[in-house]
Image (tube, grey):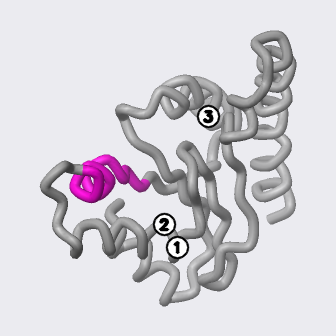
């Protein structure tokens, strides 16, 4: 799904879960097996994937135009995220909740604490998705 489609779904007040990520994001690469395992175990659960790699690369390129930088900044503001991977829950066209895997705070922890905390993130993923899909 592209960004314009996400905006269209929001404008149409659709309910959905959006996965914001990039194929070159190490945290996303680590996260995806956990997400795939959950989806495989819970048939009928679905979400949309927004690959932000291209728009991000354009914004961070050494020769990036002001328009590309502005477009990326506006997308991050509109979708209200600062880290990938992030899952966002849209209800009636508004993002009402989110889950972020291994956020910035995680990387301030010692290696030992990271091991403990990583399991918390993994457990939180299932809990977060269960609340959405089992409440509906």
x, y (%) of residue 110? Answer: 79, 17
Residue for badge 3: 35
Q: Looking at the image, which residue is at 57% across and 56% down?
A: 82
Query: Counting other residues with Cα less than 10 Å from the Cα at mark 3, is it few (<14), some (14-19), or many (20 or more)?
Result: some
Q: Kindly state the secondary structure of the residue where label 1 is placed.
A: helix
Q: Looking at the image, which residue is at 28% across and 58% down?
A: 59
Residue for badge 2: 76
Q: Which quadrant is home to the C terminus?
A: bottom right
Q: Nearer the viewer, residue 28 or 48?
A: 28
Outermost residue toward the front in this view: 62
Badges 2 and 1: C-beta atoms under 8 Å apart?
A: yes
Badges 3 and 2: C-beta atoms under 8 Å apart?
A: no
Query: Counting other residues with Cα less than 10 Å from the Cα at mark 1, is it few (<14), some (14-19), or many (20 or more)?
Result: few
Q: Looking at the image, which residue is at 75% across and 48% down?
A: 129
**Residue 26, placed above or below residue 63:** above
Outermost residue toward the left in this view: 63
**Residue 99, placed above or below residue 15:** above
Which numbered disc, 3 or 2, marks the residue that appears first in the sequence? 3
Q: Kindly state the secondary structure of the residue where label 2 is placed.
A: helix
Position of 124 compared to 76: left or right? right
**Residue 127, placed above or below residue 82:** above
Residue for badge 1: 77
Q: Nearer the viewer, residue 118 or 72?
A: 72
Start-end of magenta stretch: 50-60
Q: What's the mark number on residue 10?
A: none
Rounded to the nearest angstrom, the CA distance separating label 2 from label 1 is 4 Å
Q: Nearer the viewer, residue 131 or 63?
A: 63
């Amino acid at each position: 799904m592209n960004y314009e489609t996400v905006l269209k779904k929001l404008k149409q007040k659709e309910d959905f879960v959006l996965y914001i990520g990039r194929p070159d994001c190490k945290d996303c690469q680590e996260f995806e097996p956990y997400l795939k395992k959950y989806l495989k175990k819970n048939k009928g659960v679905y979400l949309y994937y927004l690959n932000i790699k291209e728009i991000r690369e354009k914004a961070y390129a050494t020769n990036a135009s002001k328009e590309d930088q502005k477009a990326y900044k506006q997308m991050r503001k509109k979708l209200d995220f600062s880290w990938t991977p992030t899952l966002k829950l849209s209800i009636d066209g508004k993002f009402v909740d989110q889950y972020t895997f291994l956020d910035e705070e995680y990387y301030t922890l010692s290696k030992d604490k990271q091991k403990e905390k990583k399991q918390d993130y993994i457990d939180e993923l299932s809990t977060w998705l269960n609340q959405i899909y089992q409440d509906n």
